[in-house]
Amino acid sequence: MAQLCLTARIRGQTTTACTFTISVDGSSFVAPNSQILDQSIFIIADDAASIVVRAEPIDVPKYRTLECELAPQIDGGIVMVQGPAEFEPPTVLITPVLRTYLQTVHLSSARDATERSRECLNPVGPDYPGHPPAPAPGDMSFRGPFVSPLPPADITTLEFLADVTCVKSPAISNGQISVEALSLAPAGAVAVISFPTLTAPQLFAVYWPNSVPRGPGVGPTPFLVYFHPTMGQNAPQFYADARDRHDPMTGKIYPWGFDYHFFGWWRYFNYFGDPFTVDPFCKGLPYQVEAAAKPVVLVLPLNRVASNPCDEISTINDAATLQECLEEIQGVMFRAAGNFQTPGVGRLAMASFSSGHSLLSCFLTRAGNSMHPLYSNNLQEVYLFDPHADLASETLIPVMHVASWAAAGTPNTKVARLYTQNSPTTLAPVLGRVLIIGQD
């Protein structure tokens, strides 16, 4: 006889909020023979050839039911024949008295939706809203032409590009933007992670550079959360839920409509030629991370359309929920690399572009966030990229929110930067208010 000990974990912590049953050689599923603390223990006959493990979480649908198949070996070992990445490979503990099989399952609210996102990047597919007509020759409309074939054959890696214009460091030299042409092939993995039970965002695009290791024994992960402009400002043209085509699986456009993927992350991760001369709307953020040589994981939430900017990313306005999402993303990416340990969130940076500053402000001003460790300890860098090109009074709002954050806790360790088209003279009142906060 042998025994099978099963354990469940959520974000690295063992949990009893999971019911295990097993089926041996096609039998009906049975409950454990005993329960010791957080372990469910089953007695297995020596001649068992196949064991199907079923892990049913109590919190459904946040955590889904998972199954895997194990096969005991003649030499006393055991292997996993098939099963999702949430199951760790089983191990064996052999004593003179008893042989014990050990396995752990990691319950996760996150799903790898990379392949489905790739399929959504189809500008002519009938199931996706807002697809454009074939562009006329020379047409440089906001949606096209599509220089890269869509849907692409692969979105998990980024192609080599020659002579890409990248901003240098420091970014400003002699009053001008300082740039250089570099040939880059970002070395890392691209993934789209889904959180089906969140209201918004339900999807996060992730670029995980190889410079941030994922193997066993690594420390906490450094993250950059980037807020792109609000969907609401372009809803009539691209994202409005009143469109005549909807996703056939959900009956809704968000989050699987073409526009959400194309504008929500594809244009921010890729270039369709040099952004200074061909297409300024593509940001190539992984290429910029590569050029900066900064070991940081880029996370881009995919907003939904809402009348209130804070509702576009409603759930991650809360620091605790954002931390959970980052930890779940870490878990998905670590397990894909064969690492089942989760060291947590390390140094955190946030950045916002254009009207995306309002989304950042939703997080910085939410009641209670200032007391959470993610806000007070992890968040160490904030960058505002052109929050408003015309009105210093509008620029003042996000700057004041960032200044309040920078003055809290241990401000001498924090970094805040503003990149704007406003002239120094126009910005004088803004800078004056920031200095006042710093003195307080």
Image (cartoon, rainbow, N blue to C red):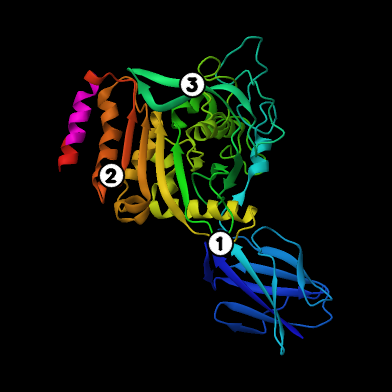
Marks 2 and 3, how far apart at CA: 33 Å
- Name which residue type carries label 3: Glu
Q: Residues within 10 Å of mark 2 (few under 14, many from 20)?
A: many
Marks 2 and 1, how far apart at CA: 31 Å
Marks 3 and 1, how far apart at CA: 39 Å
Residue 384 place in picture, x, y as percent? 36, 32
Q: Are marks 3 and 1 in contact (CB under 8 Å)?
A: no
Q: Residues within 10 Å of mark 1 (few under 14, many from 20)?
A: some
Residue 58 in view, yes or no: no
Mark 2 or 3 closer to N-term?
Answer: 3
Q: Secondary structure at mark 2?
A: helix
Q: Are marks 2 and 3 in contact (CB under 8 Å)?
A: no
Q: Secondary structure at mark 3?
A: strand
Residue 331 in view, yes or no: yes
Front residue of 303/324: it is: 324
Label number found at residue 180 = 3
Examine the residues drawn in magenta and state their main secondary structure.
helix
Please check the rendered image and state whether residue 337 is part of the magenta-colored stretch, yes or no: no
Label number found at residue 405 = 2
Residues in magenta? 426-435
- Name which residue type carries label 1: Gln
Identify the residue at horizontal 61%, vertical 58% (top origin). Answer: 339
